[in-house]
Amino acid sequence: MNRKIVLPDSEIPTSWYNIIPDLKNPPAPYYNPQTMKIIGPEDLAPLFPMELIKQEVSAEREIPIPEEVLAIYRLWRPTPLIRALNLEQKLGLKSKIYYKYEGASPAGSHKLNTAIAQAYYNKKEGIARIATETGAGQWGSAMSIACNYFGLKCTVYMVRVSYEQKPYRKHLMHVFNAEVFPSPTNRTNSGRSILKDNPNSPGSLGIAISEAVEDAATHADTHYSLGSVLNHVCMHQTVIGLEAKKQFAQTGDYPDVIVGCVGGGSNFAGITFPFIKEKMDGKKIRFVAVEPAACPTLTKGIYDFDYGDTAKMAPIALMYTLGHTFMPDGIHAGGLRYHGASALVSQLVKEGLVEAVALKQLETFQAAITFAQTEGIVPAPESAHAIAQAINEAKKADADGKPATVLFNLSGHGNFDMASYEMYFEGKLKDIELPQKDIDAAMKDRPHIK
């Protein structure tokens, strides 16, 4: 197989990059969903360790990575930067396509970059258990592994439709001693409320977040952990982009376009934020966020304050949103079904530094198959969105007579997603687009923040 792999000539980054000090406009504050007032550290303390609360609002450009975290990172980092020569040849491209491969981690995705950090800070503060949600199961897998490393108990509320579609991710969490429940459950008030109205609810990330937040808030020894969206989560993922910058320096090449899939936005932030700093400094480079047409938060949502979860327990953030009551279709890119998006990624889209596109399900699976057959890696359905758009960008650049260098983040492998691929081969997967009437209906109950 013809591939070009580049590794950095030095150790992994020793600091995370915080984009907040470099933004033209400061991010809007979060609001307390009960009081509708700006959130302070005391509001977040029942859910997060103080060190993560500090990182969430930090004005420091570089946040040192603790040695205990680096020691575990070294199990799989640095991850390779790979030029997809076979894919380029198959498609007859003059443009170059590179990908950063995060599927080499023990969890099989980029999620472990922040899970390790979050487990470390919680352990340091004396927390005994983590409650969290997961969509496709990649975050739940990562958090269960991280908790196992640091001797923490882990409770995962897994979106029911993914719990049923992706049983092996559930089993992987069990290997690392996590307890996993299909959400909505009868364990929480928010879950029981949903089941009362809809006993067959397929669940959503918004519902699962509500259950995990409620669990943490009602147990003194437990904190909540989020796998995407929040500023500190995005920051932890910047080890991806920081490594990629070093690797490109070795190639003598530089990306013209960087592509990443977006659910909450953390893996997109991880690959792009270190490069966005260079764009703000005058470098010519484009950034494209890709989401599913069935959950088009950045492309069809509105930019406004909204609750982070269905039961209105999580902080209110200024972001692109489809409405916190939004119920997504059961597409197989389970990690991309969140109603909102990272406040930082949303702000960059709003300010024109990042472009956003939405792709249909079948196009992404077609791209995933082509990629697997040429590059030898079966991608997760989430990452397939980035692959499809990277191919689109390369083809367009060739058609315009301006071959480009395209980089995308292969944020996870699809080894536990074979049921999805089987459905694709059997013709059972369908393209789904979110009707405007569903978006309008979900927008009616937003908080009124001025």
Image: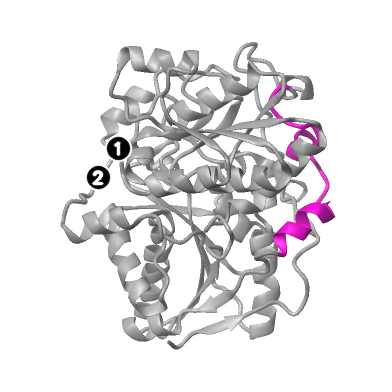
Neighbourhood count class around disc 2 (C-alpha, 10 Å): few under 14, some 14–19, many 20 upward: some
Q: Amino acid at mark 2?
A: Ile
Residues at badges 1 and 2 in contact (C-beta under 8 Å)?
yes
Q: Quadrant of the N terminus?
A: bottom left
Q: Which mark is residue 434?
A: none
Residue mark closest to the camera, 1 vs 2: 1
Q: Which mark is residue 432?
A: 2
Q: Which mark is residue 329?
A: 1
Q: Residue furthest left?
A: 427
Q: Residue at x 39, y 44 (%)?
A: 334
Q: Residue at x 55, y 42 (%)?
A: 346
Sooner in the amino-acid sequence: mark 1 or mark 2: 1
Question: SS at mark 2?
Answer: loop
Q: Residue at x 58, y 45 (%)?
A: 176
Q: How many marks?
A: 2
What residue span does the magenta drawing correspond to? 46-74
